[in-house]
Image: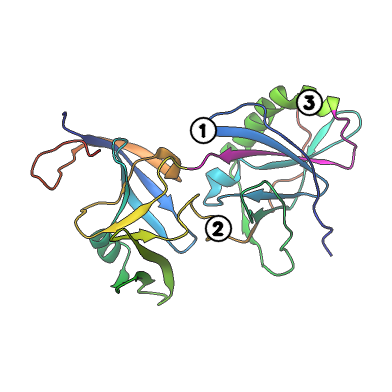
Amino acid sequence: MVPSTEILRILKPRDGPRMTSIIIVRNAHIVVEQVTQLMNIIAYIVFHQTTKGEKFFVNNVTIIKKTNESETLTNQKESHQPSSFSLTKEQYNFLLTLLQQSQLAATPSIEHHHISNTSTCIICNLRSLPKFVLWVLDSGATDHISSSLENFATYRTIPDILIKLPNGTSLCKH
Amino acid sequence: MEPVYANIKGTIIFSTTFIMHNVLYIPGFNFNLISVSQLAIKSYCSIKFTGQICEIQDNHTVRMIGFAKIHHRLYVLENSKGLGKHFAPDSISINSVSVNKVND
């Protein structure tokens, strides 16, 4: 039996391409736009806050998919079997760092709104929508190409590759 | 106009079953392109084009992992807006984060 999730407040300390938001909910369920891999998942932290301001991480964090454009929460645990992940020490430390950074930005707001000791604070890293969202299937392209880094789950630098365009030159496509 | 170089590549995940590796990042482009040849060769997919739609099928699982529709004579991947909004895993749990006091 999983109690339904209720949003108490959504705080957005700062804007940016990878905006950090804090969603305070009654139950440890959060909504993500994209759950792709471990590095994304660990951007989501759930902890309990006691009346004394102490914070504790919570076991069994369940991440449930976003259902619409707004930051609504759903509960689909009954109908879907969650998969499990484990965190390395390095990733766990990253979690701690992210949590502490987010707390700095959000602490005044949390105190202001008098969150009760039964609340759960969720710090999540909301990704802004990619600048260009259309993906076109192209039999003339030798490689997959994206114009926005926001689309990438992971990326790395490589030695320069000259991009050749269909007119035989190597020019920027606009 | 200057030559264009790509020096970043990465992985794009549309869903748990539709993952593209070795995607080049080129900021100047106005489109995101899915290379049909790379999809067929590297991702072991079958791509079926018909008059209105295109289906991308995983050869191993024989399941449809992607779906495109014609828009202005181009096959545009459906549900790619917001990446994984439609395809995102329904539920994922993190079981190994144990209860630990956060040191402020």
* Chain holding disc 3: A
Q: Position of residue A131 (x, y in %)?
A: 43, 40
As drawn, the label of residue B88 is: 2
- A66 to A77, vertically: above or below: above
Q: At 70% from the left edge and 46% from the top edge, which residue is drawn? A: B97
Q: Amino acid at mark 1?
A: Pro
Label pair 1/3, CB-CB below 8 angstroms: no
Q: What is the span of residues highlighted in magenta in the rendered image?
A: A113-129
Q: Quadrant of the C terminus of chain A?
A: top left
Q: Residues within 10 Å of mark 3 (few under 14, many from 20)?
A: some
* Chain holding disc 1: A
| Frontmost residue, A108 versus A93 | A108
Q: Which residue is mark 1?
A: A17
- The answer to if A120 sits in the magenta stretch is yes
Side of A137 relative to A121 (left or right): left
Disc 3 from disc 2: Cα separation: 31 Å
Mark 3 on the same chain as mark 2: no
